[in-house]
Amino acid sequence: MADSTRSDVARLAGVSPAVVSYVVNGGPRPVSRAARERVEEAIATLGYRPNKLANAFRHGRTRSVGLLLPAPINPFYAELAAMVEGELLTAEYIASMAISSFNAERDAQHLQSFIDRRMDGLIIASGASLPTDHVDLDTVPHVILDSGARTATGADPHVRVHTDERHDVGRAVDHLRLHGHQVIGCIAGPPSWPVNAGRVAVWRDQLRAADLPAGADLVAHADLTEHGGATALRSLLAEDAYRRSRRDHHPTALFVASDVQAFGVLRACYELGISVPQDLAIVSFDGVAAAAYTQPRLTTMRQPMSEIVRTSTRLLVQQIETGDRPGPAEITIRGNLVIGESCGCLPAGGRRSTTESAAGRRTTS
């Protein structure tokens, strides 16, 4: 059976094709209640679907948004993608996703493809340097969901919404210090990725401010995967053996810059006979759902992704629908420290984890 047309709907409803168009598009002319009901009934009966592409050309919008983010094999980005898609659907926009390769030229191809396909806006969470030498982002509304994707020149004329990493990483490191740890190592993603470089910088600043060691031999970089985390731990242990041969102190705690790496660290600790937290305390970053199911449960700084996604979607839709392009803006939102047992804290009630708010209060969850 051929697809129904606007003329078919008009014939069944007893109105002109123009009236069908007014009902479908919400104007520009008013339609009586009786005529609207007949048109809507005819649309339901015939299963009529308006030509979205034609509407896009007429109205200058496709009601679609391009989303660029790293591979969702990392559970953090899988959760992020689902949240963004849900918020956009609520606003009656469809998300089209591309995977960042941490390569500026390749990312530029993705972004230019979104622009060429007349996407109404862009949400960028690639974590890499913005490819402004290859694509003109000023031609399309966009919002950036991380703190690290700066332009090659260091200028930042964009709207940016992200977690307050200086505060949140500092809270994570301070939590380990409150447990009495004096030598705290760090495992992070590739140093070329600005977001991870920023987290390592805060880790180092916090320790130096407390007059604690924060040398390069206490940091291990690896891929943002479980395997990367396990590999990084073994690398740190090799450095640790060298330190102990010189009778230096060895790390008794770790700040791990992503939960997915922390999963690998826990596995490697199990294989090597390292007890967590008795031999090595761990606090990680991101707060993905799976962190509640490790053994022991991870203590992790949970990024406020629901708030970040809601805020960024609202700002993007506002740009699209009003045509107003705000100047540079940076909105930071603080996360919550979710207390498990990997840091050395006792479980609340023996079963439930605890959330420590930005103000330092703790509530069970």
Image (cartoon, rainbow, N blue to C red):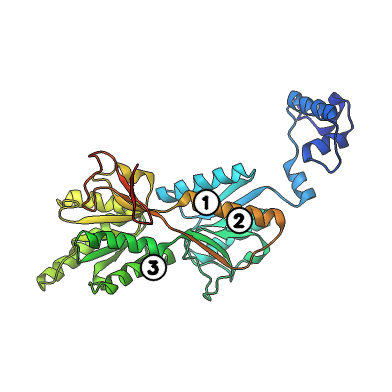
Instruction: Name the residue beneath numbered marker 1.
Output: 309
Does residue 49 appear left or right of residue 180 in this picture? right
Label 1 packing within 10 angstroms: few (<14), some (14-19), many (20+)? many
Q: Quadrant of the C terminus?
A: top left
Does residue 32 appear left or right of residue 85 in this picture? right
Q: Earlier in the sequence, mark 2 or mark 1?
A: 1
Looking at the image, do the residues carrying marks 2 and 1 touch, with CB atoms under 8 Å apart?
Answer: no
Instruction: Name the residue beneath numbered marker 3.
Output: 197
Q: Residue at x 22, y 60 (%)?
A: 253
Q: Residue at x 56, y 45 (%)?
A: 87
| 3D distance between C-alphas at marks 2 and 1 | 10 Å
Q: Residue at x 84, y 44 (%)?
A: 28
Q: Quadrant of the N terminus?
A: top right
Q: Which mark is residue 315?
A: 2
Horizontal and vertical percent position of residue 232: 27, 60
Circle 3: element type: helix
Label 3 packing within 10 angstroms: few (<14), some (14-19), many (20+)? some
Q: Which mark is residue 179?
A: none
- Does any portion of residue 83 appear in the rendered image? yes
| 3D distance between C-alphas at marks 2 and 3 | 27 Å
Q: Residue type at mark 2: give it.
A: Leu
Q: Nearer the viewer, residue 170 or 225?
A: 170
Horizontal and vertical percent position of residue 112: 62, 60
